[in-house]
Image: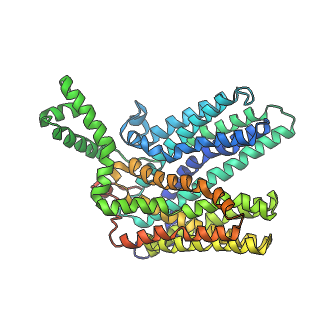
Amino acid sequence: MNQSKPSLAVYADRRMLRILLLGIISGFPWIIIGTALTLWLKEDGLSRSTIGFAGLIFGVYAINFWWAPLVDRIRIPYLTDAIGHRKSWIFTLQAIMLFCLVIWTQLDPTKNLWMVIAIGLVIAICSATQDITIDALRIEQIPVEDKASIAAGAAIAVVGWWTGYKLGGAIMLFVADKLEALGYVDYWPITFMVLALLIIIINWLLMLIPEVSDAIRREEQRVAQQKVAQAMGVQSEAVESATDGRQGSGKFSIVQILAWFSSTYIGPLLSFFKKNGWQIGLAILAFVFLFKIGEAFMGKMSLVFYKELGFSKSDIAIYSKSLGWVTTVVFTLLGGWFAFRAGVVKALFIAGIAMACTNLMFSWLAWAGPSKGLFALAVVVDDIAAAFATVAFVTFISLLVDRTYTATQYALLASIATFGRTTMAAFSGQMVDSLDGDWGLFFIITTLMVIPSLIVLWFIRNKLNLSGTTSVIGKSRSQS
């Protein structure tokens, strides 16, 4: 590929089909714990507050970096050697979700609410853990020096997520609606079995995705663990004995456990700050935390705003959902091309400013009243900016990670971004109330919220190390 003149032809690479499938796999569980669970509880007569409480299970996505190092290090017995390290994790987690769906078919939410929510939490944990290894496998599909394909892969991953969520959800709703129309009283259990069948098909397709050997990554992790053990006073011969699987003393075993834990959890952090430096590293984390807070504030209140302005559910479905999905897919693909063409940092600046300014369209809508034409224009422009911002952001953090700790570092960066959006945006409703329902002013404030992140990015723009690796792993890998 000619990286000096990137073109949309980069999406014709067959690796993009693999990444699209991974994105679909990532988005699919949201159908189960989002759309399906919500409608199931609603149609069984449970209150809005109960349904809202059930939504707390999504909080696990903001903390999945806690166990991401384990995903990088722990090998699933037999499966890892049979199908690969990343795919063995995905397959195992998909199997657990499949089992959970089968259990759901035997439960009545009105009688076993806590059990239903507990199983939903298990699915959410599996999904959040699956995202860790899916992101790692997606990044590792492309050599680190092929930055055009990395940017394109980030775009395709976003498209895949929305495709899995939207199209999978459409299948689910169609099945449930048809079963209800045919007179089935317990149509949700049957619908869950259809979703289970889709999971089986997804796992079959997963096996078609090649996975590069993790031998080099394991070796670098072993070397890091060895250095930690030696720093604790263990002799080099003893360390080599342990890493080769030979028995050592009890004292050595304890130290080796501590060395494993330190290299697993502390190693990825030290690698990140060693690569970027402490000041730049902290600035990167601040940028990641702040970048999409304004968008999150707006997104949290958007449906409330549409309803208060007088738009019907059909209007919202047509303009915000259907039209929004098409726009998101198209401009996500263009955004991936633009992120490499202009450079990811420049793309972040442009996308951040555009993402903020489009919020002003909603201020205009708030002051003009329920104009469908203006509503459609505001949604389209906002989705264009959001698509560009999302793919630029995903490309940015994909380039930041060290391939020795792909899953851990990507999960950490993504979780910090999620934590920023979920914690800060929780106050969005309170802000609207404090403004006495002045939606126009609210959207102006969300426009200004992007400024701190862009200031941080401006100061570090020439100091970023976006090589994507600190090791030789990226140079030694190639994909057909």
Tell me where residue 162 sits by quadrant: bottom right
Viewport quadrant of the N terminus: bottom left
Q: Nearer the viewer, residue 204 or 90?
A: 90
Q: Nearer the viewer, residue 480 or 418?
A: 418
54 relative position to 65: left or right:
right
Q: Is residue 176 visible?
A: yes
Q: Horizontal and vertical percent for residue 7?
A: 49, 73
415 relative position to 221: left or right:
right
Q: Is residue 470 visible?
A: no
Q: Residue at x 24, y 28 (%)?
A: 254
Q: Horizontal and vertical percent for residue 230?
A: 16, 39
Q: Residue at x 78, y 59 (%)?
A: 307
Determine whether 202 is above or below 379 in the image.
above
Tell me where residue 315 sits by quadrant: bottom right
Q: Nearer the viewer, residue 152 or 37?
A: 37
Tell me where residue 383 sits by quadrant: bottom right
Q: Horizontal and vertical percent for residue 402?
A: 34, 54
Determine whether 247 is above or below 133 in the image.
above
Viewport quadrant of the C terminus: bottom left
Q: Residue at x 27, y 55 (%)?
A: 472
Give the mark count: 0
Q: Horizontal and vertical percent for residue 320?
A: 72, 62
Q: Nearer the viewer, residue 363 or 263?
A: 363
Chosen colour scheme: rainbow
